[in-house]
Structures are given as C-alpha cells and as structure tokens.
Amino acid sequence: MVGDSLIAIVLFALDALVYSLFVAFPAPGVATPPWYVGLPLAVCLLAVVPFRRKYPLVMAYWILVWTIPYVASGFGDVGLGVAVVSCIALYTVVVYSGRRQAALYTALTLVVILTHQILQYPGDWIVNTVTVVLSLALCWVLGEFVGARRAYQAEVEARLHLLENERHQATRIAVAEERERIARELHDVVAHAVSVIVVHADGASYAVRKDPDLAERAIGTISDTGRSALSELRRLLAILRDDDRDGDHDDEGSRGGGEGARTPQPTAADLVELADRIETAGLTVRLDLDEAIDELPAGVSLGVYRIVQEALTNSLKHAGIGTRAQVRVRWDRGAGRNAEHAGSVHVDVDDDGAGKANPVLAGGSGARARRTADRAPSTSGGNGLIGMRERTNVHDGTLIAGPAPGGGWQVRAELTARLGD
C-alpha cells in the first residue's frame, strides 16, 4: 500500500502541476475549470489506488464512475491522471481478478471513452479512440504476463510446500517404524533375559542350602544373562540418543559398556549360543539348523534369531523346567535363483509342554476335533507373539503359533529372504 499510495500522490502532483501550467499559460480552445472543482475530482479519482491489490474490482469501478464527472468538467483536458489511472485499473483487474472480469471492465471503459470522444471531439474521435485502445491493449498484455508469472510462482510454492509436507510425513513414518523396531528388540531382549533370570533365581533360592554349588552356578548364569542383556540394552538406547552416536559416552558407559553399545546384532548363527543359555535355565533344546544359515541376509538372520528366542522364552516361562524343545531352521533356495529373491526360510519351534498332552486336541476325532485343531494355531497371544508376527510381516512371511495336537506349543514361521534385506 505504501508504493500504491506514492503512485497516487505522484499522479495527483502531476495533475496539479499541469493544471497550474494551463492556468498560467492558457491555451486557445481549452477551458480550464475552477481549481475547487477539478482538484477534488482528482482526489476522489485517485483515492482508491492504494487499495487496488486488496480490492481490485472495487477500485476499478470506482475509477470508472468518477471518470465521468472528471472528464465532463473539462479537467480531463488539462490532467494526465485519468488516462494513467485507467490503465492501472485495467492492469490490476487482469492480474488479480482474471480475464472475464477484465473483459467486462474493458468493454464498459471503452463505452465511456468512446462516448466522451464522440461528444467532445467529433472530428478526432477515431484517432483518439485508437490511441486509447492501444494503451489499454498494452496494459492487458502486461497484466497477462505478470498474472502468469504470479500463478507460476504460486504453483511452485505450493509444490514446494507439498514436497516439504511429504518429506516431514516420510520422516515421521520412518521414525515410527524405527521406534517399533526398537520396541520389538527391547521386548525380545528384556523378556528373554528376565525369564532366564527369574528361573535361575527361583532355582538358586531352593538350592542355596542343599546344593550351594548348584546355587552358585545359577547365580553365575544370572550374572552373565544380566550383563548380556545390559549390553544389548545399551546398544539399543544408543540408537535413541540424539547426539553423535560415535561420540563419547558418559563415564559409566565408557568404563563398563562403551563397547557393549556397539555390539553387532545377533544373527541366526548365534542360535547355538542361545540354546546353551536356555539349557542352563532348565529347558532342553535340540537344534537342527541348515548348513548355510551363516549366509542368510542380515535382516532375515536377525528375524530368525528373535523368533526362535521368543519361542524358547515362552516355552521356558509357560512350560517350565523339564520341557524339551526342538528348533528347526531350513533355507529353501530352490526358487531363489534370481538376483533379488533368495528363497524362503522356514523356522519351526516345538516343545512338549513338559510331557503334558493337550486334552482338547489329543482326544476325540471327527469334525469337531478337526475344527478345534484348525483354530488353535491362530491364537493371537501377547506382545511376544505380536512381535514375532511383525517380524514375519516385515519379510513378507507368515506365522502360525498355538497348541500342538499332541501337547505343548508349536511355532511355524516362514520368511522371504531377499539379498537386499
């Protein structure tokens, strides 16, 4: 508005200057109206120019209405403001209101100008009208150019804003997925470690008086399990830190767990060590692993480890000491000969429930027993089963977990292995 106000002031100053020159040096055939008539008309004509961007149509038609008394009083012959402000009005309408409104305004303006020229200048009205039409055409073209430029800039800004929103949305989704992954890792680590610690603590409390050596071994297992869990927790918590992950940690982390925070993720090759730890807690584990398990992609290998860990932890918690479990991992690469697909990995974990048969599934026959057996593997379970199901979904796999027909619990997982995982 400051710039438009300056334009209005300059136009009024030019009108006043030209009017003063005509008063000082009268021209033959030109009637000079009184100043108290012409100058107020000029003020009324130019008063809305500062508001032309906010109210383009109001400004344009205001100027068109006041143009009639302005030129009828004869001030149009001794002033330049009406011609310039009419061009400004048309330019403003084209830029801010569009072609349809500009076409209507142009038609009305031409009617007013043509009527004035025919009535006041019957001999020269054709030349004057052509001059006015060319001036208005120039203003229209200029308005079209500026309007197209403004529309282009608005479109670019809108697209940049959309891309920025999409980037923020993608970042939030990535953060949410990473938090879900870390939550699964934390659950697996804590659930496994706490289960082992609780089992050994109970055993140590019973054996502390009768068999001190057994209690000492149990306490040692608790210590080792706790240190291992603490190391993995430090690694996961280091990911959540906002500062430099490779920078210096606090004194406690530097002394006791600095390297633990950088411990690599477990893989399927660590299942032997996992089975040894589980067996020390009282669960007999038999492993049947594929020979090429070390060559699994890192993501699939971690998923296999966590699924087996969760399944054995559940067996230890719910079936108790004396349970026998069998773990089978097979990598079927028959259909994975191309560059991307590396086949399917089948993970089977079974336990006998400490020898307790399931009466619902073990007894009876016929359709009812079959329906019961079909429904049993679809048990939803708690967070552990949810975590296993999410890990299989990440690798486009399937998971079946539930009571086994002969008693105990069974877990069947199939993961799709890709070389980029």
Image (cartoon, grey):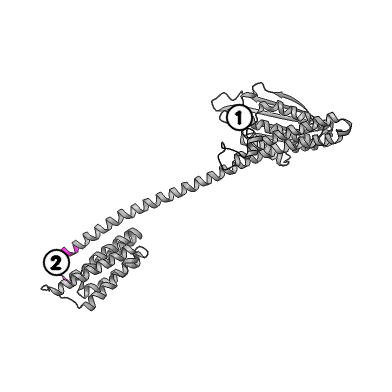
In the image, what residue type sits under mark 1?
Answer: Ala
Task: Specify whether 175 is left or right of 208.
Answer: left
Residue topped by disc 1: 298
Q: Nearer the viewer, mark 2 or mark 1?
A: 1
Picture coordinates of residue 330, whole percent (x, y): 67, 25
- At 13% across and 68% down in the image, what residue appears? 123
Q: Is residue 215 above or below residue 164?
A: above
Is 164 inside the magenta-drawn segment? no
In the image, what residue type sits under mark 2?
Answer: Asp
Q: Residues within 10 Å of mark 1 (few under 14, many from 20)?
A: some
Residue topped by disc 2: 124
Q: Which residues are magenta?
A: 120-129
Asked where in the image residue 400 lies, by quadrant, the reply is top right
The N terminus sits in image quarter: bottom left
The C terminus sits in image quarter: top right
Picture coordinates of residue 228, whole percent (x, y): 70, 33
* Viewer can see residue 372: yes
Task: Specify whether 22 is left or right of 296.
Answer: left
Is 121 inside the magenta-drawn segment? yes
